[in-house]
Amino acid sequence: MTAEPIRTRLLALAGALRHFHSALLDVAKSDYEFLHGKISSPFTLYNLVTGDPAFQWLRPLSGLMSTLDEVTDQKGAVLTERHLQDVRQAYALLFSGTDTRFSAFKEGYEKARHDPQVKATEQQVQGVLDGHEA
């Protein structure tokens, strides 16, 4: 596969991950609001996402998305199949039963995974990872 189709696929993956992250964030926000009342503004939500323990489980996925954006934003970078493999491996680690570094992410995901939007966006991510544009 040449560099441009790989870049296109990585960009599609970045978009799919953003939608997945957004769906997970919506579930976390809903859970938070159930316990603490309505979040008053996007700024308040931003502060909660960056500082409140109720949202910290999303950070590993946020970090993966940020790294992927950095890779695809590099001007003149030659992207290879290795980049796709690295993203597949990093994404798989988030759900790994043997890697305890991401146990908080897995716990948060397990609570959210039955939400229809989470399911749909997760399927989009998997479709791009499997080589099908979602």
Image (cartoon, rainbow, N blue to C red):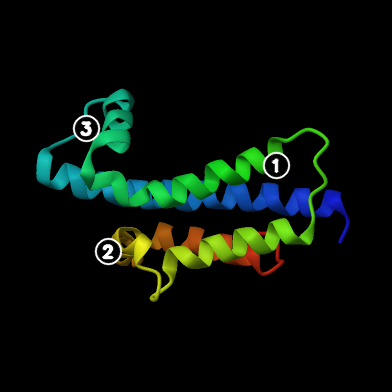
Quadrant in the rendering for residue 110: bottom left
Dot 3 or dot 2: first in sequence order is 3
The answer to whether one can see residue 129 in this image is yes
Query: For mark 3, does the 10 Å Cα neighbourhood hold few (<14), some (14 to 19), or many (20 or more) residues?
Result: some
Rendered location of residue 78, percent (x, y): 83, 46
State left or right for residue 69 relative to residue 53.
right
Q: What residue is shown at x 52% (from left), y 49% (from top)? A: 64
Report the number of numbered marks: 3
Which residue corresponds to mark 1?
A: 72
Instruction: Give the residue type that dot 1 points to.
Output: Thr
Query: Are the residues tagged 3 and 1 within 8 Å (C-beta)?
Result: no
Query: Are the residues tagged 3 and 2 within 8 Å (C-beta)?
Result: no
Residue that lies at the very extreme toward the bottom in this rendered image: 98
Rendered location of residue 131, percent (x, y): 71, 66
Instruction: Give the residue type that dot 2 points to.
Output: Lys
Q: What residue is shown at x 42% (from left), y 57% (from top)? A: 117
For marks 3 and 2, give the CA distance: 20 Å
The answer to whether one can see residue 115 in this image is no
Instruction: Give the residue type that dot 3 points to.
Output: Ile
Which residue corresponds to mark 3?
A: 39
State left or right for residue 113 relative to residue 2.
left
The secondary element bearing badge 2 is classed as: helix
- Does residue 36 sit above or below 119 in this rendering? above
Checking the image for residue 111, the label placed there is 2
